[in-house]
Amino acid sequence: MTICLVSYSQSFQIAGELVDEKNLPLPSATTVLLDPSDSTLLYFAITGNDGRFVIKNIKGGKYLFQASLIGYNTLYRTLELPSAAASDMGIIVMPVKVYGMGEVTVTG
């Protein structure tokens, strides 16, 4: 007698678009899903030239979404899958990172 057990696990995906404050796409930004308990990287994608990203084959659960690009503030959002709101993150605006400078003295 042969018994065959098959387990199907459901996987999900999230998608969205990263833009700057002028609504221009942000290519080559990093989007990741982190374990909220210890910030371990679990899934990732890089945005295309159009600023769009898709992270596929995600197991259901709670995650910390992180989007980052040099020159912009890193964004964080908590999300839980499955969720319609989490699977289509829509347009995400990334604010420019402002660097403050201390006093500068020029002598000649």
Image (tube, rainbow, N blue to C red):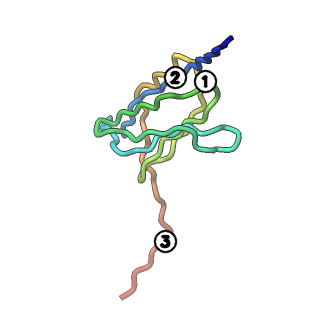
Q: Residue at x 40, y 28 (%)?
A: 91
| Image depth: mark 3 or mark 2 in front | 2
* Contact check, label 1 and label 2, Cβ < 8 Å: yes
Which quarter of the rendered picture does the C terminus lie within? bottom left
- Frontmost residue, 99 versus 54: 54
**Mark number displayed over residue 60:** 1
Question: Which residue lies under the disc numbered 2?
Answer: 12
The residue positioned farthest toward the bottom in the image shown:
108
- Frontmost residue, 3 versus 65: 3
* Contact check, label 3 and label 2, Cβ < 8 Å: no
Which three-letter amino acid code belongs to the residue tagged 3?
A: Glu
Of the residues under marks 1 and 2, which one precedes in the sequence?
Answer: 2
Of the residues under marks 3 and 2, which one precedes in the sequence?
Answer: 2
Question: Which residue lies under the disc numbered 3?
Answer: 103
Sort mark 3 into few (<14), some (14-19) or many (20+) by Cα contacts within 10 Å: few
Identify the secondary structure beneath mark 1: loop
List x then y, in percent, for residue 95: 44, 43
The residue positioned farthest toward the front in the image shown:
1
